[in-house]
Each structure stands twice: as structure tokens, then as C-alpha cells.
Image (spheres, helix red, strand yellow):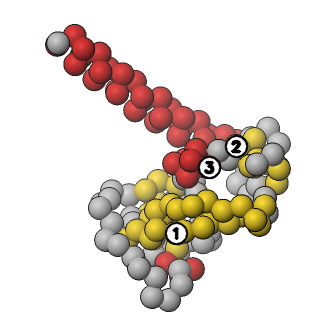
Amino acid sequence: MAHRSVLPLQAPIKPASITTMCNTITGNYKPVGILTAEQVRFPEFDANVSVNSHDFLIFDPKCSFDLILGNDFLHKIGLKIHLDTLQLEWLGKKVPTNSRFMKDRLTAAVNSCLIEERRATSIIISIEMNVDQAI
């Protein structure tokens, strides 16, 4: 998710098809649009490497963060979160999270995402099994 205030002027924002609230560690936000970002770079890791393209949900309410990276993005690029050391790892380089959140709160947030992912996977497996049984 990206805050509208950090977008370039005249950035092409598509209407958001998602009408539900997005739950984050900083609060709940309703997307107001979608921006496709090209060649996203994270100079903390490597200024010469970029992520080709990603759709970011745009939000408006006041937030202390300009950008909130979701599990979909982190998984896509292979970024690892080390909760034991509060570090992020990407492309073999580790950087501190610089988080104002306590370790246990970060762990709880990550664990809740993993539970949701497992739940979604088990629903898909269950649906596939039911379809196979019906055939």
C-alpha cells in the first residue's frame, strides 16, 4: 500500500476493485485506488536492482508510513523477515527493520498472516478434493 501523498503528480491511479478494509500493523485502511509502479528500487539493499512491476493499493488517511509492503509483495521478491534479530534480508544483504513496534507485536502480525495463508491454502485443497471426489 502507498499513501497518496507520496505519489508523483498526475500519477495514473486506477479505481480500486477492492472495497474491504486492509488490515495492517499500523491500522485499517480502505483503498482509494491502485497504482502500477514500475522499476521499484530499494537502495538499502542494492540500488542497481529493481522490481519490474507491482500494483500498490493507494490509501488516504493519516499514517506514519508512506509505504506498507504486504505479504504478496514480500513473497514476490523473496524478502525475508528475521523476527529474532529484527532484520530484513533480500539478495543476501540484511538491514535492520527500523521498526517502532515491539518484537512481540511484529511476531504476532507475521503469525496472523501465516495463519490466514494456511487457512486459504487449506480451503483451496478442500475445494480441489471435493471436486476430485465429485468426478
Q: CA distance from mark 2 to mark 1?
A: 21 Å
Q: Secondary structure at mark 1?
A: strand
Query: Who is closer to the viewer here, 7 or 48?
Result: 48
Count of residue discs: 3
In the image, residue 128 sits, relative to residue 66, either above or below, namely above
**Residue 102 visible in the shown view:** yes
**Residue 103 visible in the shown view:** no
In the image, residue 15 sits, relative to residue 76, either above or below, namely below
Residue at image point 16% right, 13% down? 134
Residue at image point 81% right, 45% down? 92
Percent of width and height locating residue 15 = 31, 71
Q: Is residue 81 left or right of residue 54?
A: right
Q: CA distance from mark 1 to mark 3?
A: 14 Å
List the residue tagged with mark 1.
37
List the residue tagged with mark 3.
77
Percent of width and height locating residue 59 = 45, 71
